[in-house]
Image: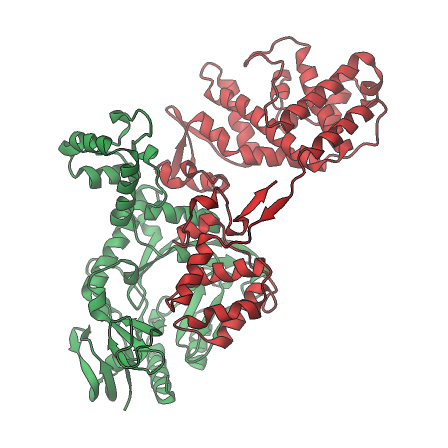
Amino acid sequence: MLALGQDEIAKYPFLADAGQYLKDKGFTLDQFGRDPDLKDLITKAYERIQVAADGKIYKSDLVGDQVSREAALPREVFSFLLAIVLLKLSGMHTLIKRFALAEARRAEKYLEKDLANISDESKKQLAIRVIDDLFSVQIEKIDDYFVIPVSDYLKHSINFHEREWKLINRHVENGQVFLTPHETVRLIRKELGTYINSKIVNAKTPTMIPGFEDHVNKLVMLSKKFSTFTVTTGEYPPCIKHAIDVLEKGENLPHSGRFMLATFLLSKGQSVQQIAPLFKNAPDYNERVTLYQLNHLAGTSGSGTQYSCPSCEKLKTQSLCFATSECDGIITPLQFGKKRK
Amino acid sequence: MKETDTKFLESAFKKYYFEHFDLIHVPQRTSEREFGYQKFNSGMTRHISVKDDKELHLLLMQNVPSDVYCSNAYYSFPNLPMNEKDWKEADLIFDIDAKDLNLSCRSNHTISICNECNQISKNSDQCSKCNSTKLEKKSLPCKNCIDASKTEVLKLSEILINDFSINKNDIQIFFSGNEGFHIYVYDSQFQQSGSRERSELVDYIMFNGAIPEKFGMKKFKPNRNSFPDFNESGWRGRFSKYVYGSKSKRSKIISELLVNGYSSFQKTLDDVSEKIGTKIDPNVTMDIHRIFRLPGSINSKSGLTKILCQDLEKFDAYSDSCFISEESVEIVANCPIEFKLKNKKFGPFNNEKVSVPTFAAVYMICKKLATIA
């Protein structure tokens, strides 16, 4: 674990050992519920969650990069730790996810500032070490850029769906990708979110603490706002329509296209017997082979693995994507036509 | 395939294997690889472990496979079912195939075999006899196909070496035995990259998914200075060399690009992708559990051997990969197109009985264009 200074814990509170921190400061959770002076901090913690739930980033008392007032720092850390206690007590997973993401974005801001800090080498080094320790991404600085190996870059960039993150749209040289401080930090946002999320999920849930009940109940109410249900139009996405078209014309659909079609229809609940006739027109149709392969994909024969439908990204690479405006940012054909209400 | 033909191919393949153990070796880290093979008129046998050259040679003699494969991946337990193998890493592999290059020569040497009535005709969309559209296409690739594939191999190596800093000695190029090349990259930083990461590498190498902003064009207030320089590295450099043509034309071309606007620029990028992107088969590189044709083994699509190209430029695919015997054999050939093997021309044959060397007979029978008389 990194040795952290006071202001660093305030910036990256998820790096601290929560229980140890409270003990070091001489507090117990019960006190926060009882002591009228400390109770304000629970409200602060609740607000921190509320801001996150709205998709915003919590504005801290830390002014810019500077340590403001000595007293602000522990409060900053307490509100984070108490927020986790509230979330655990409420048991609302949607809120935990939103909170983790918002906290990740908050930390991201500080990491970016620290990375770009040219006057304070130690701050930059800390940021580089945080990134290396948590995500095993080794960053090197070349001129104004932060440089990481292509293979490390890809591990993270594949989680993005925006085209600007594709390797082709990056400066690549000598097996390395060149990034600005902003991009470097943005690259690990999801992992940072996942890291914070897992820390919260893995934390022990305390028994209800007197004085916390009101806020916990409010959180349960708050989370109701985010329950969704979806409706589906039932129409097939253009890639699937195209594949069916090709087969109907008796033209050759490549193996990857057949894989996509079969896994798509299987996921939509069709049976092997329903799907098999689709391939009848294929130039190399063989009933025995088709059934064998479909059963394999469905997991009813062979290793028992059920194969899932490829992502849109993969289909693009395989030239099987024929996206229309109706696809509207979906990441797998299975999401096509689903609308959140 | 008729049984007499299968028997003939088996005996020709067996003879090759028996006489060329020197060409067929297990790859490095043998015990971590999965092997597989196919026999004539039969399915795939895979999830096999092979200990050493001796065991591999024994397998070839006992089974006389039509095709032999070996994983590019390394596993803890290569002979267990897929999800129990414990995947460790995989060499980076690429397949460059003449059929994916949209070559104009292709229609001249493609043959259609009707699945309904077995009629053989020159390339068409319909059977000339029964009008069926269920056709199997067979290509007898020409020198142009191989030369064009070689160009793609060079483009690929250039990117691997310059952009990805891969050591030239860690790249091996093989003729696939049919109409293209297989490229292996060992010990790179991508050994442990998964399928999705490799698919990004594929898009990079093929120049897929480029956005105008990265290549200098902005939607609002475009600026001359953001366009790539002629001597830049990576794709921006290759882009400028192709689009500007020469250093002196840079300024003029940029003015044109600016006048034509953003959406036209996206079309330019698509055109660049088509013209200078490297045409590799994405599925092969993305697949980290593939069993890939074993070097030194025969490709049953042609009877030619998958063989290492020491000197790509001088490599003569249809002579350097042909190891089947010269012994004369009588066949009925129905091959409407001329082809060249070992510097000898054969065909066209119009459903006629002819005497040809075994290697030519094997080639035509593998392509389903002849049978043993």
Number of labels in the image equals: 0
Of A177 and B113, which appears nearest the observer?
A: B113
In the rendered image, the residue lying farthest to the bottom is B373
The answer to whether residue A325 of the structure is visible from this angle is yes
Of B55 and A67, which appears nearest the observer?
A: A67
Which color mode does the image show?
by chain
Of B141 and B360, which appears nearest the observer?
A: B141
The C terminus of chain A - image quarter: top right
In the rendered image, the residue lying farthest to the left is B248
**In the displayed structure, does residue A267 sit left or right of residue B135?**
right
Tell me which residue sits at (54%, 63%) in the image.
B78
Give coordinates of residue A18: x percent, y percent: 72, 26
Quarter occupied by residue B14: bottom left
Give coordinates of residue B48: x percent, y percent: 51, 69
The answer to whether residue B27 of the structure is visible from this angle is no
Tell me which residue sits at (30%, 77%) in the image.
B131
Tell me which residue sits at (66%, 35%) in the image.
A226
Q: Chain A rendered in what hue?
A: red
**In the displayed structure, does residue A106 sit left or right of residue B204?**
right
Give coordinates of residue A136: x percent, y percent: 53, 36
| B50 to B332, vertically: above or below | above
The N terminus of chain A - image quarter: top right
Tell me which residue sits at (38%, 23%) in the image.
A144
Quarter occupied by residue B362: bottom left
| A230 to B61, vertically: above or below | above
Give coordinates of residue B300: x percent, y percent: 35, 74
**In the displayed structure, does residue A83 sit left or right of residue B267?**
right
Which chain is drawn using green? B
